[in-house]
Image: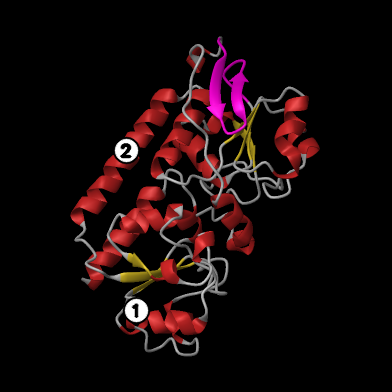
Amino acid sequence: MRPVRTLGAVMVLIIALTTGCGGDTGTSGDTSSGAQAVTVQAANGAVTIPARPKRIVSLSPTHTETLFAIGAGPQVVAVDEYSDHPPNAPKTKLSGFEPNAEAVIEYKPDLVVVSDDLNGIVKALEKVKIPVLLEPAANRLDEAYDEIRDLGKATGHAAEADKLVADMQASIKRTVDASPKAKGLSYYHELDNQLHTVTSKTFIGQIYGMFGLRNIADEAEGASSGYPRLSREYLVEQDPDLIFLADTKCCGQSAETLAKRPGFKNLRAVDGGGVIELDDSISSRWGPRLPEFVKVIGDAVQKVQ
C-alpha cells in the first residue's frame, strides 16, 4: 500500500492502494514490428493499441519505473511530477493526482498509462481516441506481475516484461528462503509521522507476512480500513521488535527523530537497533524495485534474530 509519489501525498496513495488491479491480458497480434494492433485487458476494460506506441505518457511513478525497466524508456515522452526514478525519465509538471487531459494531450501521446482514474482522465482521453491503460495499485504480488506484463504487451516489450517478472520472483524467493522465520517478531510500518500505518491485509503488509512477522496494527482501532492511524499510547504499549520508517524523505524521520518522541526512547526497536529507515519511494511502489524492499526486510529480520 500505494509510490512514494512523495509522502506529502501519502493519504491519496493510501486511497489508491485499496483499489483493484488489471486482469489477465490478451493480445491480437505482435507489437514488436509496430504493424499490428494489441489488446490489453486493463482495469478500464479491453484497451486496443493500434500500433507499437512511440509517444507514451506515464502519470504513475510505479509504471514509469516499469516502462524503463522493460526497455520502453525511449518511447516515453513525458512522466508525472512524482516519477523520480529512473533519473533520466522525462519528468514534467503533469500531475497524477489532479490530471489535466489538455496538458496530457499537448504531448501528442499514442498511449497514456495511469494508476488512478482521477478527474475523469480516462474518459477524457478516450474521447479523443488516445488509448489509456488504467493499472491500479496492486493488492497482491501476482497483480503487480500482471501489470508489468500488461505494459510489456502494450509497448512491444512482452519478452522483456516476462524476464523482469521472472527476475523479481527469483530475487524475492532467494531473500525469503535465506531469511530465518521471524518467530513471533512484531513490527510497525510507519507511513507518516502522524502514525498512519498498514495492516497485514494490505499489499505492503503481505510482503512483511512472507517473513512471518506479526503486525501490531492488525488489532488496532480502525484496522478494518487497512490503513489505521495508531495512537502513541497503543504503539508504545505494543512495543514492536522492528519499526520500519517509510517517511524518511517526506517527513524527515529517522531513528534519531523517533527516539526523541515522547515515550519512544525505551521501545525495544529503538533501544535494540531495530529501527529501519526505508526509501519512501521504494517501499510504497509495486514495481521493479520491489525486491529491494523485500531485501531490506529480510536483512532486518536476520539482524534482530
Query: Left of 28 or right of it: where is 200?
Result: left
From the image, which quarter does the C terminus lie in? bottom left
Q: Which residue does the image show at 50% across and 90% down from the upper left? A: 262
* Residue 171 figure quarter: top left
Q: Position of residue 6 (x, y in %)?
A: 59, 59
Mark 1 crowd level (few <14, some 14–19, many ≥20, 10 Å Cα)? many
- Work out whether residue 256 can be spotted: no
> What's the residue at 54%, 24% (across, down)?
40
**Res 237 → quadrant:** bottom left
Depth check: 41 or 243 in front?
41
The amino acid beneath tag 2 is Asp
Q: Secondary structure at mark 2?
A: helix
Residue 159, above or below 217:
above
Label pair 1/2, CB-CB below 8 angstroms: no
- Residue 35: within the magenta? no
Residue 204 x/y as whole percent: 43, 56
* Residue 269, disc: 1
Horizontal arrangement in the rendering, residue 161 relative to residue 2 (left or right): left
What separation in Å lies between label 1 and label 2 (alpha carbons)?
Answer: 32 Å
Residue bearing the label numbered 2: 167
Identify which amino acid the numbered label 1 is placed on: Ala
Tell me if residue 42 can be seen: yes
Q: Residue at x 36, y 53 (%)?
A: 292
Which of the two marks, 1 or 2, is nearer to us in this view?
1
Instruction: Say what secondary structure mark 1 lies in.
Output: helix
> Which residue range is magenta in the image?
36-54
Between residue 304 and residue 237, name the one nearer to us: 237
Q: Residue furthest right?
A: 102
Question: Would you place residue 277 above or below residue 232 in this image?
Answer: above
Closer to the chain start, of discs 1 and 2, is: 2
Q: Is residue 288 left or right of residue 100?
A: left
- Is disc 2 surrounded by few (<14), some (14 to 19) or many (20+) residues within 10 Å? some
